Image: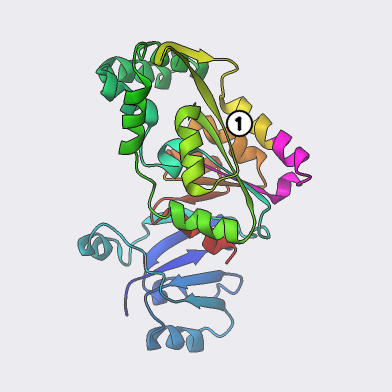
Amino acid sequence: MPKSITLDFSQKNIWMLTSGERVLSPGQENYFYLLFAEEIVPAFAQIAQQYPHLKYRILTQRCLHLSSPETIDNLTGSDWELCTAPATLPIRPKLISFDMDSTLICQEVIDEIAREKGCYDEVAAITEAAMRGELDFDQSLTKRVSCLEGLSEARLARVFEQLTFSPGAEKLLQQLNQWQIKTIILSGGFDFFAEKIAAKLCIKNYYANRLEIQKGRLTGKVIPPIMNAQSKAEHLIKIALRENIALENTVAVGDGANDLLVLNQAGLGIAWHAKPAVNKQADVAIKVSALDVISWIWD
């Protein structure tokens, strides 16, 4: 039987990379499974016959691309956690907000700017201090941006050209736009980059921190107000209200502690390759696969 992904939505359970027999055991009448595989094979039909009481759906041509065959072999048959999800998923949403750094794109932009400026170690030390609780987000951002003083817009543009979309990001946004779902970026990063990312992905609006630029160079200051965790949640509420969208029809996607408030505020909060603390509080925690797996929830 080929390797497959089983998505178990029962009682906020987990995705597991496993054989069907390991998961589809008697007594699990209330479980709902999605089997992702390269093709429908006789083994799936046998499982369906063996457990006719189970509701199931087989999706073709949706094989999870892991890093190597060895990775798949090591995980098969184990209880390796891939994703958690609630037992009841919402209807197709009307508004989805995305974090930018390490969500829509692979990189943390401020780290890439710091590398371009030659002050990465200094910025990293400030980040570590914030992670130890010595600085809050606003303080950390202000101190890190001060290290970037003097960098030219041309070099910022060079940083942008080096950024890469997270796997599946373009495909996901294409699908969401086809469904006419409103999409926005809510980022603690910078508008210089969010504007360009939004344009490339056809995202309707973006909200991010504004770097002060004078005479073509960074001044080392952020133009207030700072977009922090509270601001993200407030923006989601305001936008939903403006668009006459109930909060239960919204989704937020993010990876960091700065996303926790907006993830909890949205009707469905999705943690994307996030830290354990974020995964624990999110409604859905996706830990492998490409970003477009999100669209499968409503497909």
Q: Nearer the viewer, residue 172 or 102?
A: 172
**Image: magenta residue range:** 237-255
On whether residue 253 falls in the magenta region, the answer is yes
How far across and how far down the image is residue 15, in percent? 45, 60
Vertical relation: 165 (above or below) 49 = above
Q: Which of 286 and 235 is in front in this view?
A: 235
Say left or right for 187 vs 17: right
Vertical relation: 202 (above or below) 298 = above
| Image quadrant where residue 103 sits | top left
Q: Look at 45% across and 18% down and name the residue there.
A: 141
Q: Look at 46% across and 40% down and name the residue there.
A: 197
Vertical relation: 19 (above or below) 235 = below
- Name the residue carrying label 1: 232
How far across and how far down the image is residue 144, in percent? 39, 15
Q: Is residue 58 visible?
A: yes
Q: Farthest residue toward the front? A: 215
Vertical relation: 262 (above or below) 7 = above
Say left or right for 25 vs 80: right
Q: Which of 175 and 144 is in front in this view?
A: 175
How far across and how far down the image is residue 54, in percent? 57, 78
Q: Look at 66% across and 54% down and name the residue there.
A: 93
The kind of residue on which mark 1 rests is Lys
On whether residue 157 falls in the magenta region, the answer is no
Question: Which quarter of the figure is the C terminus placed in?
Answer: bottom right
| Image quadrant where residue 226 sits | top right
Q: Can residue 26 be seen in this view?
A: no
Crowd tier of the residue under label 1, counting other residues whose Cα lies within 10 Å: few below 14, some 14–19, many 20 or above: many
How far across and how far down the image is residue 148, in percent? 36, 15
Q: How many labels does the image show?
A: 1
Say left or right for 77 vs 194: left
Q: Nearer the viewer, residue 131 or 247?
A: 247
Question: Which quarter of the figure is the N terminus placed in?
Answer: bottom left
